[in-house]
Image (spheres, rainbow, N blue to C red):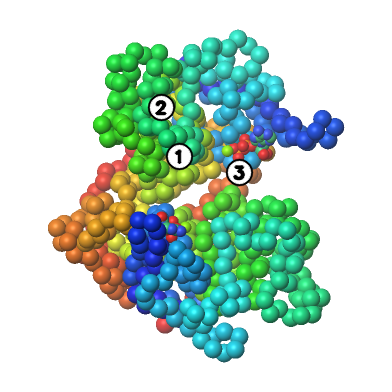
Amino acid sequence: MIELNDIVVSYRTERGSINAVDGVNLEIPDGCIVGIAGESGCGKSTLMRAIYGDILSPMSLSSGTIEYGFNDRNGEPVTSENVRNEWFRTLSYIPQSSMNSMNPVIRIREQFIDFPGTDPNKKRVLEQVREYIGKLGLPVEALDSFPHQLSGGMRQRMMIALATFFQPNLIIADEPTTALDVVVQKEILLLLMELQEQMGNTILIVSHDMGVHYQVTHKMLIMYAAKAAEYGDSDSVFDEPLHPYTKMLIGSLPTIGEDRARHGIPGSPPSLWGDLQGCRFAERCPLATGLCRSQEPPLVEHKPGHFAACHFAGADLPDTGGAGWQ
Amino acid sequence: MAVILKTVGLNKVYRLGSFFRAKRIQALDNVNITVESDRPVIIAVVGESGSGKTTLAKTLLRLEVPTSGSAVVYDKEVAGAGSRPSRREFLKSIQPIFQNPFEAFSRYRNVDAYLHETAIRVAGLSAPDARDAVAHALSSVGLEYNDVVGKYTNQFSGGELQRISVARALIPEPSLIVADEPVSMIDASRRMIIINLFRKLRDEEGRSFLYITHDLATAYYISDFIAVMKKGQVVEFGKAQAVMSDPQHEYTRLLLNSIPTTRQRWRPRNVAPATLN
Ligand SMILES: Nc1ncnc2c1ncn2[C@@H]1O[C@H](COP(=O)(O)OP(=O)(O)O)[C@@H](O)[C@H]1O
Ligand SMILES: Nc1ncnc2c1ncn2[C@@H]1O[C@H](COP(=O)(O)OP(=O)(O)O)[C@@H](O)[C@H]1O
Ligand SMILES: [Mg+2]
Ligand SMILES: [Mg+2]
């Protein structure tokens, strides 16, 4: 189990400091795919980088702790202090565009061999890599290419191969398919799901596409303005969302074959620089009352394993004219 | 019935590299589509990246010259060898909206300067009339003149800025608005505000749209007609409802099957060990 204990992640800027992740408490059981959703700027990538241990100035983990619940190669518990030594070993990262995280001047096969501490017998490692690529159903020739010679989709598949080669306990994927066409996206997500099933490890996947989350995840975390708004099993979150923001997020999606009017969520999240009193969603929430504007709702377990931070969790939203429009 | 859009044998070949080692890219490959209607319509163009959607848009906007073939918009030939309207007359009938609203406006100018410029230069209005036209266009997209005037791009969200782009396009009262991926940079939670706006402008102000997107769900939601493109070709074209509910081309079926919906899973998920109690 991975535990986030009230973590605050800040950026130091000229104007002062902002908390891009502001007191997140979470227990992530082993062996599941957890989806992270929310508007851009709500802190998804910041949270992922903090968990990955990629904490460089101006970013800092200003309070709270992360417990990984697994050990490093020497049998010592992985902590925020030593997590960087574990990159690509017990935890790995798949970014939106692998172009930026692969070394552009070395061939794909060398990127595998370059791992710190890999078996010094390069030939043997390369044999293992070839075998692994074949097992994933990927073309072995791609190993001999430079990153820019591959299509975006093939590069992303190679990145997944890199990220899973050592069977890490945790994989963090930040919008891994956002830049790809839907056909390629589906193939890549299916590959990732299959690998997770085989390895039984934990994957955190960020996406702004609720459809992707529905297809892939076991659990969902909905973030809003640096906070966790809702967390629970995906079935429960999709079938009976508790937070008005989650309801509106799911309800704003059109679906092919359904002729119901859809509405976006008007307004914007509050500035993290401002005075953040009460519930951060209150300004855009159809249910908000004086209580919401003055008191911040804590993240509370409303049903077994299903948490929401809302004074009116589970309450129905007013009808927004969802009748047919055609 | 008016011919809202008709392309005849539209081809566009880009040549890259030197004269001797030129590489041909057939960005549009014999595109033939006809949309006739008495009412304004929304025509969606969908397809994978590189399929030629933007090239089609640019050809209609006269930003690219087709290698061969022609295009007619509202009974006027806009591309091809035939006689063409003057640039100003052209811009009064077709207006673009681009993908990235932050690139459409300079950071160093007030955004309303662009709206006034369009009103005076393209719509040919006097200064007082221009102000009214700008205010009217902004109210059509749900914004107040006084909330926009004098502000810079960094004072707006992407969604607001895209609404201002739509307002700018409305000022010359064009018959057709060509919108190339207008919501792909906008947060999912706010996309529907723009999409619903297109429908309102079609129904209440009589504007037609060419809506270019790779998002089939929003295309289904607002469009009357849909063209599915692949490698420069329109592989399927027809009424949106018909194409989406009974796709004829294998590629359209593949696209539809690849959309991650929140209705039906691609495959049963394994149960995570930890969630087994
Ligand atoms: N390097 C940085 N310096 C200052 N602020 C930053 C930096 N990176 C991100 N932020 C701010 O932190 C917040 C969260 O950003 P991010 O985690 O990237 O959000 P998301 O991934 O959900 O879009 C945003 O308000 C963003 O402006
Ligand atoms: N100015 C250009 N010069 C050369 N090739 C181009 C140019 N613009 C587009 N292309 C090529 O034409 C094809 C179609 O591109 P485009 O119309 O932009 O597709 P889409 O908008 O569907 O992604 C692509 O192969 C693209 O690389
Ligand atoms: Mg991000
Ligand atoms: Mg394009």
Which amino acid does the dot numbered 3 rest on?
Glu
Some atom of ligand 2 lies within 8 Å of the CB belonging to the residue at label 3:
yes
Q: Label 3 vs label 2: CA separation?
A: 32 Å
The answer to which of marks 1 and 2 sits earlier in the sequence is 1
**Disc 3 designates what residue?**
B48
The answer to which image quadrant residue A144 occupies is bottom right
Which amino acid does the dot numbered 1 rest on?
Phe
**Disc 1 designates what residue?**
B102
Residue B114 disc label: 2
The answer to which of marks 3 and 2 sits earlier in the sequence is 3
Ligand 2 occupies quarter = top right
| Chain letter of the residue beneath label 2 in the structure image | B
| Chain letter of the residue beneath label 1 in the structure image | B
Q: Label 1 vs label 2: CA separation?
A: 13 Å
Which secondary structure lies at badge 2?
helix
From the image, state whether disc 1 or disc 3 is nearer to you. 1
Q: Residues within 10 Å of mark 1 (few under 14, many from 20)?
A: some
Give a yes or no on whether discs 3 and 2 share a subunit.
yes
Which amino acid does the dot numbered 2 rest on?
Tyr
Which secondary structure lies at badge 3?
loop
